[in-house]
Amino acid sequence: MTKNFNKSSLTLTKEEHIKENSNYLRGTISDDLKNEITNGFTGDNFSLIRFHGMYQQDDRDLRIERNEQKLEPRHAMMLRCRLPGGVISSEQWLKIDSFVSKNTLYKTIRLTNRQTFQIHGILKKNLKNIHQILHKIGLDSLGTANDVNRNVLCTSDPMESKIHQECYEWAQKISNHLLPHTKAYAEIWLDQKKVFSTDHEPILGKTYLPRKFKTTVVIPPHNDVDLYANDMNFIAIIENKKVIGFNVLIGGGLSITHGNKQTWPFLALELGYITLDKTLSVAQAIVTIQRDWGNRTNRKNAKTRYTIQNVGLKIFKKEVEKRANITFEPIRSYLFTTRGDSIGWKKDINNNWSLTIFVENGRICDNNNQLLKSGLLKIATVHKGNFRLTSNQNIIISEISNENKNKIENIAISYGLIKTNSKLRENSMACVSFPTCPLAMAEAERMLPVFITKVENIMLKYSMEKEIIILRVSGCPNGCGRSLLSEVGLIGKSIGRYNLYIGGNRIGTRIPKIYKENITEKEILVHLEFLIKDWSIYRKENEHFGDFIIRKKIVKEVINPIHDFWN
Ligand code: SRM
Ligand code: SF4
């Protein structure tokens, strides 16, 4: 027997009422935009602006000081762009950079691990301006946050092969197909006239999804998108150098709540194989099932992974077949062998060049080490091709002609964009955390660069400096840095303290397990030194760190996270 989460005796969450009463996501956002008394949004609008791709934040470094001065927190918005597959042209980049440089508090662009960029520190009075700029250059931020299908990921660099190009187009089609239909975005931000016909959300419904929903299109053997962390995944199956269909996997997700054993990370499960022509109807069926069956009474158990756990995969699959009018074929064979970006120069299908630049934790700014923001701006002024953002928070300058290669290379070198980094650093990742993230419990982006240097020193001490460890940090158990798919994962507990997880694998198909709880950075380094030393002595030939940890039973392997993750 399955539980009906949403029967009337259970109380729907506050967010469900907000959506229901929002008039298709309008709320009173327009009134708030005129309100000059506060720099923030009021009431339900605080949550509703997220559907339009913005979060209200305040600078946490300044909270105490402003509180003492009896000032309102320094409210500013973060905007997340919709960029399925992560492609952005040089021209678009120039416009974004110009807005960021003139109109934001931080003057940086932040690449995210979902192949897009965020702009932090936008004052309310500048919001319409950025939306109108985005619109003019063919971009938007609709549905990049809250209870909808988010930015759709696709294995990076569509110019690498025709298959990549095709899959990139699927990412766009899926994103467009599942977008909210409401005209609220155009009315509020683009000043388009109110249309008096009744709004209708044919796929998402009036109260949208119970929770965020994440989708990928992925080309084996490269799992750069970390598909197992996503709600819905399409793995390209290739025959005679053509995509003929997709294996469909559902129900991945990584967030937990410290100490709450009713929450667990989960890897996406196989549903079956479909031919290409079924892609959109299957995507729509999965989303509508999650819309109808997902838990709307408890947001901590509302994602697809919990719906599947509640009804069982078999019943979920049957319902997808019914709604999409298809029969899944058995899963076709596939194998993942890599996850990280390969930094540096590569040739593409048209004999042009691409240059992948390592962006530490996705932050595009100028500092003493490199003038990344200025360098990319300079490249955008001479480069005729595109920029491509990766799910590892890096950027690819793509479609560089032979004639332009030297010019771009010279700019990249002179601004310090091409550097030799350890494999450890290139494969590390941190979420944003302080000072903008309201949920941060410990530092992530700001602590990782120095922390990595310390781990590099340990690796060097044991002659392991050429090896990779996938090391990721998240400032809280929401796990945005995908720490629960790493070989060494840190998850913030409080300022300066983390839970240490170990034993995930290199390609992102095994969840790590807690090794030490609530320890300081210094203590983490002591434990890591001990483990790295042992690994250097007792590893089998080429054995990865995470595999060594499991073989040596230093932690128990997480096979079924529902049972193994906490126990
Ligand atoms: Fe995330 C919330 C940043 C990828 C799980 N995430 C947030 C917020 C918006 C905080 C908030 O709700 O107020 C963070 C904004 C910080 C800031 O100042 O920018 C934030 N998440 C990020 C980014 C920027 C991290 C990064 O450094 O790249 C990523 C933006 C992706 C994008 O472009 O859409 C980001 N977040 C992820 C991932 C990884 C992924 O998707 O591959 C996860 C774990 C995977 C998953 O969903 O299970 C993730 N973020 C969360 C959660 C937990 C959701 C849940 O299922 O319970 C929250 C909190 C929430 O939604 O309530 C959250
Ligand atoms: Fe913020 Fe936590 Fe996500 Fe880091 S993991 S960005 S601290 S919500």
Image (tube, rainbow, N blue to C red):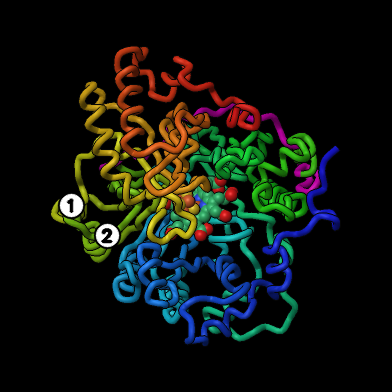
Task: Specify whether residue 407 is in view.
Answer: no
Q: In this view, does 344 lie above or below 465?
A: below
| Residue under the point 52% across and 33% down | 240
Q: Where is residue 93 in the image (x, y as percent from the top left)?
A: 34, 65
Nearer to the camera, 15 or 232 = 15
Q: Overall secondary structure of the magenta stretch?
A: loop
> Circle 2 sits in a helix, a strand or a loop, which is it?
loop
Q: Which quarter of the rendering shows the C terminus?
A: top right
Q: Position of residue 248 (x, y in %)?
A: 63, 39
Residue numbers of the magenta segment:
320-344
Distance of label 1 from label 2 (alpha carbons): 10 Å
Give residue 41's quadrant in the image. Answer: bottom right
Amino acid type of the residue that numbered disc 1 sits on in the rendered structure: Asn
| Residue under the point 52% across and 31% down | 511
Determine which of the numbered discs, if any, sits on residue 369 in the image: 1
Q: Position of residue 556 (x, y in %)?
A: 53, 21
**Along the horizontal axis of the image, is 94 left or right of 226?**
left
Task: Specify whether residue 305 is in view.
Answer: yes
Nearer to the camera, 394 or 566 = 566
**Along the horizontal axis of the image, is 219 left or right of 407?**
right
> Circle 1 sits in a helix, a strand or a loop, which is it?
loop
Amino acid type of the residue that numbered disc 2 sits on in the rendered structure: Cys
Q: Name the residue under label 2.
A: 365
Q: Where is residue 198 in the image (x, y as percent from the top left)?
A: 75, 78
At label 1, counting other C-alpha atoms closer than 10 Å, the crowd grade (few under 14, some 14-19, many 20 or more) is: few
| Total numbered badges shown on the rendered structure | 2
